[in-house]
Image (cartoon, helix red, strand yellow):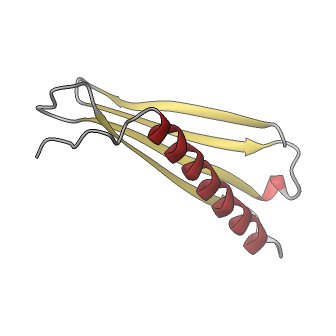
Amino acid sequence: QTTATQTVKIIEHSKNRLIIEGESITDDAPYCDTFTCQEVWIALDVPNSPTEKMIFVRLMYINFIKRNFFKNIVETKAYEGLIENAERWLIIAKNLGIFAQKAPL
């Protein structure tokens, strides 16, 4: 584990949409001064849904600000972390019954 500093900014906040941009700087990981992690979180309302539902999208990009020989390792570990995080979220969502009902067409 490591510590990080994250800066977030609300880009849009309306009745049907929330868009948040973020940038994380890892403070004590190897080669942390060579990259930042940029994210966009998008939450969209599902119109005409009989229950309160939304679509959530999370985009992430590793931005290298300095070149180094370990770029591939950093990108690989970041990708593995994203997959692990998505798998955890999927397990939680299934346990909460989020996928039990079919969405209206």
Q: Residue at x 20, y 42 (%)?
A: 103
Asked if 30 appears above or below 1 in the picture, the reply is: below
Asked if 31 appears above or below 8 in the picture, the reply is: below
From the top left corner, tell me how far across and down residue 8 is, in percent: 56, 32
From the top left corner, tell me how far across and down residue 92 is, in percent: 53, 38
Q: Quadrant of residue 7?
A: top right
Q: Residue at x 83, y 76 (%)?
A: 69
Q: Residue at x 45, y 32 (%)?
A: 96
From the top left corner, tell me how far across and down residue 68 is, in percent: 81, 71
Quadrant assignment for the N terminus: top right
Query: Is 53 left or right of 74, judged from the image as shown?
Result: left
Total residue callouts: 0
From the top left corner, tell me how far across and down residue 16 is, in percent: 23, 29
| 18 or 12: nearer the viewer | 18
Q: Quadrant of residue 10?
A: top left
